[in-house]
Amino acid sequence: MKFIRTLAFSAFWLLVSLSTASVLAVAGAALYFAPGLPDVRQLQGFELQTPLRIFTRDGKLIGEYGEERRQPVTYDEIPQGMVEALMAAEDASYFDHHGVDPKGLARAAFQLAASGGDIQSGGSTITMQVARNYLLTRDQTFTRKIREILLALQMEQILSKPEILELYVNKIFLGHRAYGIAAAAEVYYDRPLAELTLAQQAMLAGLPKAPSALNPLANAERALIRRNWILFRMRDLGHIDQTAYDEAVQAPVTARRHQAKTEVAADYVAEMARQYAVERFDDAYTGGYRITTTLDSELQPKARLALANGLIAYDTRHGWRGPEQSDVPRSLAEAQENTDPEGLEEELAESPEVMSTARQAAERSQAEIPGIDGDVSNWLQVLDRTAVLGPLEPAIVVDTDGREMRVLTRGGEVRTLAWDGLDWAQPYRNAHYRGAAPNSAADIASAGDLVRVLQRENGDWRLSQQPGAQGSLVVLDPKSGAILALQGGFDYDASKFNRALQARRQAGSIFKPFIYLAGLNSGEVTPATIINDAPVVMEDGSNQLWRPNNSGGNFLGPTRLREGLVHSRNLVTIRLLQTLGLEQTIGFLENFGFDPERLPHALSLALGTTSLTPLEMTRGYAVLSNGGFDIDPWLIEKITSGEARTVVQEADPMVACRECSPDQQTVERDGKTYRVAPRIVDPAADYLIRDMLRDVVERGTARRARSLERSDIVGKTGTTNDQRDAWFAGFNTELATTVWVGKDDNSSTAEYGSQAALPIWIDFMGEALAGTPEHWPERPDGVVNRRVDPDTGRLLHDDQPGGMQELFRADHLPSYQPRRVDQAVEQESGSQGTGAYEAIF
């Protein structure tokens, strides 16, 4: 008996000691961390700010960022079932504790010790989560956890339980850009929060733990397990009775994607504007900023479609790479049999009932489509969560019959693909080679394969696939540098890498016009100057001999510069650069914004071996278009803030002005005053290069552009070694547009610029310029037309027959061709063999 009393006495004092130690530890932590804690009182009357919104120049929405999918609700507007579902999922004793749940923390600590660092439940109450979401970072550190606990204790002294819960439900991220439960109700179910069923409330309550992994759109079978565990908890906690539980756990998955639509698809541009805002404003996502860009709402869709269609056409020429996914389970029940339980250990460990009811709910989620046998609920789920990429819709093969294929598309539509929409699908072997043509639809794909389909202009559907090549299209206003349209890849959802800004690729022959212009601007050469198109061998700086060649492998001998550019002769450009000198030429190229540190200080510069982005390349061509004025590309026209639309920033670009006097500093346009951009190219030289580039379209490598039937468009094709990059850059007086096509891994496209890039440029410019008048700039006073000998490039006297017309700078004319006389005059004069008029007379 004495032993028992002693044991009880010792246990009592041990408990008192531990309690005292705990209190002292908490007090010590409070004293240590209190000075650096945020002020909890700032949460009183906390206002959720409006998001960052981005628009075209005419006010069309192209993007929203931050907390935009948010519909704040008051506590009174939250259905009781939603409150109880959140408590069951996150904090069962929310209304009983004072900010911290000792049992939850003890459980988390025990799991941490027992599993060697793996915590299934974090021990955070709803109050602690509010502290973290509003006042702290999300760093996974013990220090942050202590701060979180202390803030939660303070918060419970200042705010009521309804106020804290209101803050929680409006802040939590629930996937698909939905912040808060009301926004999530719209995103997943397209209905107000008050109209959600119990099963739908439980589904949303399950999302805060892992908004991506447990999302009913991304992974319905895992989301069902989480949902039914929450319903299991709600029943055990007494929030719902057995009847409500039985009905809810059997409910099928009803979530569907209901995204807010932008007015103009321009994700790459929206992301550029977002990054610009984030770099400048600490409250970019919450400060109510409205960014107006220079984007043209009519040109952007044309650019996006032209690039997508061009890349699809390229891909079709190179063969079928197979389905995106094979053997997709038809039913949700079948898919759930293969569910990975990782991350759901807590839910599954509670009771085997959770898995069995989830399986039953999956079976009740069945969906039948007329014309297809059996349950296809999982096929519909997979299609709903698979992004549409450009004009390519996801589809699942239902069956094949001879030379026909039936596919299921979004919304439960069954499409039949005829053979003329399938026969292109020869197996892709590499960029240069395809396999044998298919004989039947079964040779191409099988039932359960996830593929892509494309609707043609006549309404029929054909098989397609996500292109194996990428591209970009950039359009500038050459007069100001404003970005009017920009597409940085096939589709932003497929790849967020913006090739227009971020992909530095070798320029190839589209760089040649700038070498020619350097000579024309200096006056050292004219369009009629003769350069020998002949082999050259020289040191390349690495003890190796460099033997550059022309693309066709042939040589034309003495060639006029105009012809050298028209036919993109490599050796002509190399010898021209050699004549001009590297340092002088690079100094000139700096004026176009080309970084001299990235320009090769070697004659290979003539062949476009420098790596440039499509935007940089477009800027250079915009200068050629505007008459030789130095303009900078720009995107942000105006930034305003708040409901009053207070102007935070407004663009002040410099503009090209052909009609301005050389000393004029500003010019009035559309009621605004702009600074005049400095001229970096002699107007006569710029006119000459433009005229030479017109010949590239009329009879050179860009002849396909004649299909536009316009005389005011000019441009240049470009292809790099092993056909890794295909380019076309061109312009008229209104638009400067560059198209690049290539592969992200820098492998060969097996096509030239005239094959892969030029058709895209033609497609876009044909739409962009439709109905606009042609306009060719007036010839500057310093440009004259003279007749020359096509073989020598020299001027012909009036009495000399034949020849051809050529343009020159008036102050840089070539010498005259010597007159020729016949043999009789030679013999009479005693000057046989000279044939020169000046030698005789």
Image (cartoon, helix red, strand yellow):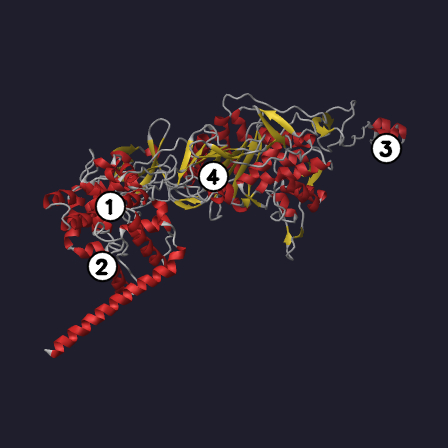
* Foreground tag (3 vs 4): 4
**In x, y percent, where is residue 133?**
34, 49
Tell me the residue that label 4 is attached to: 273
**Label 2, label 3: how many angstroms apart (C-alpha)?**
117 Å
Instruction: Indicate which disc, 3 or 4, sits on the residue closer to the N terminus.
Output: 4
Q: CA distance from mark 1 to mark 3?
A: 105 Å
Category of crowding for the residue at label 3, using alpha-carbon neighbours closer than 10 angstroms: few (below 14), some (14–19), many (at least 20): some
The image quadrant that residue 82 belongs to is top left
Contact between marks 3 and 4 (CB within 8 A): the answer is no
Q: Secondary structure at mark 2?
A: helix
Q: CA distance from mark 3 to mark 4?
A: 76 Å
The circle drawn on residue 205 is 1
Secondary structure, mark 1, is helix
Amino acid of disc 4: Ala
At 38% from the left and 54% from the top, the residue drawn is: 37
The amino acid marked with disc number 2 is Lys
Quick check: can you spot residue 409? no
Disc 1 or 3, which lies upstream in sequence? 1
Which amino acid does the dot numbered 3 rest on? Gln
CA gap between label 4 and label 1 equals: 34 Å
Q: Label 3 near label 2: C-beta < 8 Å?
A: no
Q: Which mark is residue 832?
A: 3
Circles 4, 1 touching at the beta carbon (< 8 Å): no
Lower sequence index among marks 4 and 1: 1
Residue ID for mark 2: 103
Q: Nearer the viewer, mark 4 or mark 1?
A: 1
Please report whichever mark, 2 or 3, sits nearer to the chain's N-terminal start: 2
**Quarter placement of the C terminus:** top right
